[in-house]
Amino acid sequence: MEQSSASRRDFLKASGASAFLIIKPELVRGAGKEVLKAGLVGCGRRGTAAAADFLTGNENVRLVAMGDVFQDQIETSLALLGDAAKNPGIQDKIKVDPEHRFVGFDAYKKVITSDIDIVMLCTPPAYRPMHFEAAVEARKHVFSEKPIATDPVGVRRFIATVRKSEQLKLTVMSGAQRRWFDDYLETVQKIQDGAIGEIVATYARFFDIARIRVTVRPPEWGDMEFQHRAWYPFVWICGDHMVEQHFHSLDTINWVMGTHPVKVVASGGAAWRPRQEIYGNIYDHMNADFVYPNGVHLSSSSRQYPTGSFSQVDDLVVGTKGRSNCHDLGPSKGQTSIWSKKPYVQEHIEMVKSIRGERPYINQGTIVAESTMTGIMARESAYSGREISWDQIMASQQDLMPKTFDLKQKMETPPLAVPGVYKFA
């Protein structure tokens, strides 16, 4: 799963890798079978599911610390994890005492500085670069949900931290779960070995239902609290559908091609989303034409329409000798759903094996950053109406993160991007 050396060099040049860091002796891989303790940062639905998968897949592991901006998120997460009917067999691995349930914007720091070995980063993606940097500085192994940022500045910050994590031999596992799905693993390898001939074209579709987490805003919520509770409709914290959800298809095609695209032209808009606060400022559809270094194109479409609309998630790679949907040449011959639970658990099994030295070292930081930036590049092309190259997006100074954090803070939502008016910088 290593990316091309040229691709890695591009990232290292842009990220400004730091000098070698001294690793603590107790963090050397393969130390033994001792209990590995994890802390969860971000206790929403995805974070709760990730914690359950981690505990389900491994023995001698514990969940010992949790942090979130909201107290109710922690309580709800603990209730779900403690429900033996929904998450059987993990209850005796949950050891989160009240003193290790941290609330607030600095909760991640308190989780990270707890007596843990692994940090699970599962907040909305805008916070990933900041949290990942703190985790690596504290010499913790990391499970990082995808995507890893919502803007180019964040991606570069993440990549600079990846270099430190590699020097320290810290395991970094991403939430790109298809990379641990047997059908995908075997199929992608066969494609790369020439099973369908030379690749001439690729396609990706991610047609999904709209993610509306808040339908009515309570009057007591400040702007920042509302945007955190709702989060998906806001570009700064979500990244738009092309970045946050379509990531999986973009990551799959990058994996097949062995690198990232060199340029993109994209278009999109909001066809059905009303201009109301709860719908934020993301697009509801986007189409992109990516070009890879060898001239092969990826025709990519992502969409989130109301419940009841057509839904389909699929990819297609066309070769001179055949075609593949990227998981039809594996053990189940494409009969297992891509939503199978197995790869979600398997990624945590492989992470723990890497930490314990039972398998080759894993650090997926660079590949998940490349796939994140692929989506951001397309979003910025669609928003601005311009063709954007990889070099341009890597040099962009766009930084969407707020500079101060308070749940009562005033935060006006930027208008929906209009090509010709919106400026890419």
Image: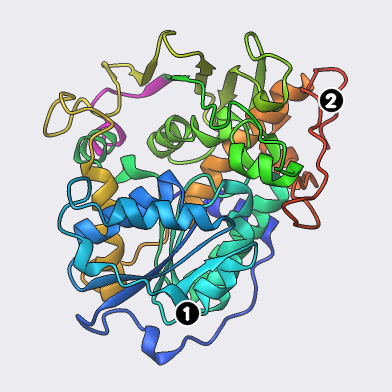
- Residue 174 visible in the shown view: no
In this orientation, which residue lies closer to the viewer: 60 or 277? 277
Which stretch is magenta? 189-200
Q: Looking at the rendering, which quadrant does residue 178 occupy?
A: top left
Q: Looking at the rendering, which quadrant does residue 405 occupy?
A: bottom right
Residue name at image x 36 percent, y 62 percent: 362
In this orientation, which residue lies closer to the viewer: 215 or 243? 215
Residue 102, magenta (yes or no): no
In this orientation, which residue lies closer to the viewer: 163 or 92? 92
Q: Are marks 1 and 2 in contact (CB under 8 Å)?
A: no
Residue 190, magenta (yes or no): yes
Q: CA distance from mark 1 to mark 2?
A: 43 Å
Q: Please, is residue 115 above or below residue 207 in the view?
A: below
Q: Which residue is mark 1?
A: 114
Q: Please, is residue 220 above or below residue 262 in the view?
A: below
Say which amino acid is labelled 2. Tyr
Rendered location of residue 156, percent (x, y)? 66, 55
Rendered location of residue 109, percent (x, y)? 58, 72
Q: Which residue is mark 2?
A: 422
Q: Furthest residue to the left?
A: 331
